[in-house]
DNA sequence: CTAAGTGCAAATCATTTGCAACCAG
DNA sequence: CTGGTTGCAAATGATTTGCACTTAG
């Protein structure tokens, strides 16, 4: 229970190891434990919340209500496998001119976008319709 | 407590009144109550689940973990006001050719897409930075 | 000392499930 | 009767909060 445990830093270190692209809260907590710096779930939540505020992390809301987090970096979109739930990054699929046009058509100011596609990953694709 | 209360039908009726574009579970439950056909939350959840299965409704997952539902119809994307949480529909912002290209580049099959933009609605836009 | 960060337990919120009662065919 | 539907209560799972304690500045 080292009190001088800077949880947000530990979280950032963990995600920077690049073991995975996007993390669930549980994966983050588990990752910290494996690294020997276990932290309480509430502390991890607080750390992530802080890192989001500081724009070090971004929240990725999958369509099914689950949430993952990833390092903030250059923008990209996501595809999620409807079969095995894998998540992958894609180059951005929304274009500036279209956003500009949407702004004009709608009267809104558009600040950001996040796209999550549903799809089949290469592996699940092979298995076709079987279950 | 009229047992011959077909909750899914009631929900569909409610949403078809067109009072709003997208509904939270609470709004649906409240709407039913106002219409005199109150139903248990669990029944509403079951009804919505069923309507989703039947493709009568679609789930809209906002980026902040909240969920809304809307009548299934022709596809459209959404913008959400980061200030007042209003939600509006937009013409689709993702183009087939881009999806096709993403499929080729990634090896995934893309089945569907949902886009939720962050923005400022016309009203909040006027208030500028004030709070 | 003071403010921020932390662990632990308890609370909250949204959604789901178990189960007995109920209605249509 | 039989199966699908419903209300109610209890269970779940994810996230948040209260609180006492601790450490850096």
Image: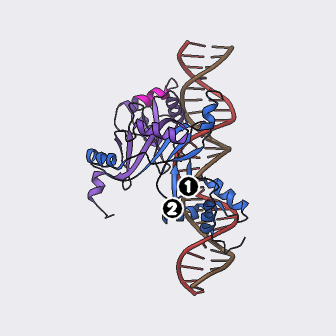
Chain colours: A purple, B blue, C brown, D red
- Asked if residue A109 lies in the magenta stretch, the reply is no
Which of the image's four quarters has the N terminus of chain B? bottom right
* Cα separation between marks 2 and 1: 9 Å
Residue under the image location 28 percent in, 60 percent down: A127
Point out which mark residue B52 bears: 2
Which of the image's four quarters has the C terminus of chain B? top right
- Residue A75 image point, x, y percent: 39, 34
Q: Which residues are magenta?
A: A1-12
- Residue D8 image point, x, y percent: 70, 64
- Residue A5 image point, x, y percent: 49, 26
Residue A17 lies in quadrant: top left
Point out which mark residue B112 bears: none
Residue A42 appears anywhere in the view = yes
> Considering only vertical position in the picture, is A115 above or below D6?
above
B28 left or right of A104 in image: right
Q: Which residue is mark 1?
A: B69
Residue A13 lies in quadrant: top left
Q: Chain of mark 2?
A: B
Give whichever of discs 2 and 1 has the lower sequence position.
2
A66 left or right of B102 in image: right
Query: Are the residues at dot 2 and dot 1 in contact (C-beta closer than 8 Å)?
Result: yes
Q: Chain of mark 1?
A: B
Secondary structure under badge 1?
A: strand
> Considering only vertical position in the picture, is A111 above or below A130?
above
Residue under the image location 49 percent in, 29 percent down: A51
Residue A59 appears anywhere in the view = no
Are discs 2 and 1 both within one chain? Answer: yes
Residue under the image location 45 percent in, 32 percent down: A57
């Amino acid at each position: 229970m080292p009190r001088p445990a800077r949880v947000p830093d530990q979280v950032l270190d963990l995600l920077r190891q690049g073991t995975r692209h996007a993390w669930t809260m549980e994966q983050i907590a588990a990752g910290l434990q494996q690294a020997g710096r276990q932290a309480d779930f509430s502390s991890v939540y607080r750390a992530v919340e802080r890192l989001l505020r500081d724009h070090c992390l971004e929240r990725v809301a999958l369509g099914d209500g689950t949430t993952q987090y990833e390092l903030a970096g250059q923008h990209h979109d996501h595809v999620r496998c409807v079969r095995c739930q894998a998540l992958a990054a894609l180059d951005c699929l929304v274009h500036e001119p279209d956003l500009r046009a949407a702004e004009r058509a709608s009267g809104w100011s558009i600040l950001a976008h996040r796209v999550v596609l549903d799809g089949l990953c290469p592996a699940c694709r092979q298995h076709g319709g079987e279950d």
